[in-house]
Image: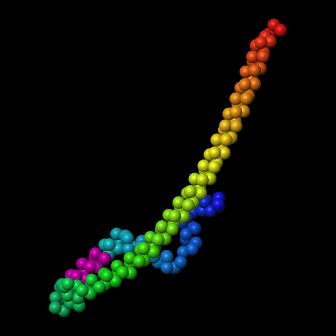
Amino acid sequence: MRVRASRNPNELIEEKYTFGEHVADAVASFGGSWVFIILVGVVLIVYTCINIALKGKAWDPYPFILLNLFLSMLAAIQAPVIMMSQNRQDKKDRLRSELDFDVNRRAESEIQNLSRKLNLVTEKLCDVDDLLRERRNSFADSGPNS
């Protein structure tokens, strides 16, 4: 358990990484970025502007049914991939919390051991203090005149 808790949870998870999980993380990372949002926005604006400018010769005239189909397919593919990445992140979080619990449990045990040792040292110091008082009192009772 000591070795397991000292490991990095990211390393533990990545040891079992599959190719699909790498792809899911990359898609989720890109799909949840401003670069993706801006890129999709630019593509949508260019696509609609070209189709509006071509008027009767446009391959996808208003109301852009083909564009809606592409966006639906993109969402249908992207959503499960992002969910796979979120599931992996959930596994990482769960492992991280288990490792934290192990560390906390060991720390609590160490604190209890230190507390016991501190109590023992305190008792020993009290015993030494009592012995010194007894000697001082016996020395004072016998006095220097004796």
Can residue 26 be spotted in the picture? no
6 lies above or below 146:
below
Residue 46 lies in quadrant: bottom left
Image label count: 0
Residue at 78% of width from left, 15% of height from top? 139
> Considering depth in this image, is 113 or 70 the residue closer to the camera?
113
Q: Quadrant of the N terminus?
A: bottom right
Whole-percent x, y for residue 129 in the image? 71, 26
Residue at 70% of width from left, 36% of height from top? 121
Q: Please tell me whether the stretch drawn in magenta is mainly helix, strand or loop.
A: helix
108 lies above or below 20:
above
Whole-percent x, y for residue 114 in the image? 65, 43
Tell me which segment is drawn in magenta. 40-49
Whole-percent x, y for residue 120 in the image? 70, 37
Whole-percent x, y for residue 2 in the image? 65, 58
Residue at 62% of width from left, 46% of height from top? 111
Can residue 138 be spotted in the picture? yes
- Residue at the farthest bottom position: 57
